[in-house]
Image (cartoon, coloured by chain):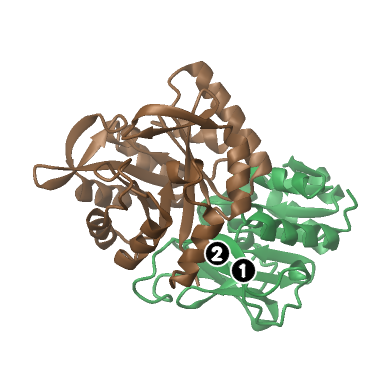
Amino acid sequence: MLTKRIIPCLDVKNGRVVKGVNFEGLRDVNDPVALAEYYSSCGADELVFYDITASAEGRGIFTDILRETARRVFIPLTVGGGIRTTDGFDRVLKCGADKVSVNSGAIEDPSVISKAAKLYGSQCVVLSADIKRKDGEFRVFAKGGRVDTGINAIEWIKKGVADGAGEIVVNSMDTDGVKQGFDTELLCEVCAAVDVPVIASGGAGCAKDFVDLWKNVPDVDAGLAASVFHFGEVRISELKELLRDSGVHVRI
Amino acid sequence: MIAIVDYGVGNLFSLGSSLEHIGCSSRVTADPSDILAADGVIRPGVGAFGDAADKLRSTGLDVTVKEAAASGLPLLGICLGMQLLFEKSYEFGEHDGLGLIPGKVVPMRGVIPDGYKIPHIGWNSLIYPDGGRCPLFENTPEGTYVYFVHSFYAVCPPENLAASTDYGAVLTAAAYNGNIFGTQFHPEKSGEAGMEILRSFKKICGVRK
């Protein structure tokens, strides 16, 4: 039986892991390669690396880190952050990434999804969306959540899947950083709209939030979080035992 | 030395790294003489069957792989690299495979029940229909979780089925035919469990280093 996945996310800037609270006030946490190895040994099912470096120099450091991680960690690795073209896909796939997530890049040029899916397969293309309630609907935000695109999130995700995205990361800006649990309402709508795997992101504050996630949205495939794992508030091995004891099928 | 066949498809970096991790020397190569001189051959692959089969043929590596297989070299196909070992695939049309393991590759859609998502992505557990006789799983207990990413799967005769997995329907997870092995899942992405399977392949190949 297929298991539900636990995915720690590492935001990487200039070779260090950072995590924003509501995308601002970044704090330096740890060495990404060491942290990736640690998470893998604790039972993480996958890892996500977001490259939040702006400079070309920083990009070079990031691919070095990616290569070093792929040399030492043997679980699936998704890379995102500033990827806008199939060349961007190529750059990180060659360094050991298995999947690439697109966010603002797909908003600027939606054709990147179909082009990448054709070149590398849908399993490689992850559509990540920052979503917030606005004017009575779920709205997609761009540029790390700073710009309201005016696009309806559910329609955007359906289109992304039709174009070839093989997985969706749903990041609720309303619950992100608040640590009061995942955005059940939004996740239910997304799961009902598409038939590809959906990854829940934004809002995990404690282990029970993951139990509630699968109690309330059984169709979600994975739970993604950053700070609760980085700061040791939730230990992945203990979280998985709690999930198993709560009847959620996980890999232990 | 294990030759990793480079025909322009797949995450070769992770496969090379995982072999290095288990202390097995490897070379990513498209050179037939390298492949035929190796102790064993691994063919990775992700993407579409038709494209990959065309690439394999246009580079002439289909002939090399068949020659290596006929000479008795242990051969491991991973994911799409495994699917290419079968006789035919029905992924977007009908395509010929290498025919090194009897069977065909068919879509999961229509076979698995409604409500199961396609692709089948994630960690699923191994079932041994043959009681675990395949030497690839010598040190891997039944129920071990491995990482899958696929939308099509292979159907083969029971004597070639090494492992299956339950995704609403029973799907082929690994198949074998003498010195030919194939895994639908990715051992190079299956953590320590995957490393153990690669160690078994290394042993089958008789690679000392």
Of residues B95 and B127, the one drawn nearer to the viewer in this rendering: B127
Question: How crowded is the residue under tag 2: few (<14 C-alpha within 10 Å), some, or many (20+)?
Answer: many
Asked if both marks, 2 and 1, belong to the same chain, the answer given is: no
Furthest residue toward left: A135
Q: Amino acid at mark 1?
A: Glu
Which percent across, then down, holds residue B108?
A: 45, 70
For residue B20, side relative to residue A147 (left or right): right
For residue B127, side relative to residue A183 (left or right): right
Per the image, the residue denoted by label 2 is A251
Q: Quadrant of the C terminus of chain A?
A: bottom right
Q: Residue at x 58, y 42 (%)?
A: A36
The chain letter corresponding to green is B
Which percent across, then down, holds residue A53?
A: 45, 24
Disc number lying in front (2 or 1): 2
Residue B87 is labelled as: 1
* Secondary structure type for disc 2: loop
Q: Chain of mark 1?
A: B
Of residues A243 and B169, the one drawn nearer to the viewer in this rendering: A243
Furthest residue toward front: A233
Which percent across, then down, holds residue A50?
A: 45, 35
The chain letter corresponding to brown is A
Q: Amino acid at mark 2?
A: Arg
Check contact, mark 2 vs mark 1: CB within 8 A. Answer: no
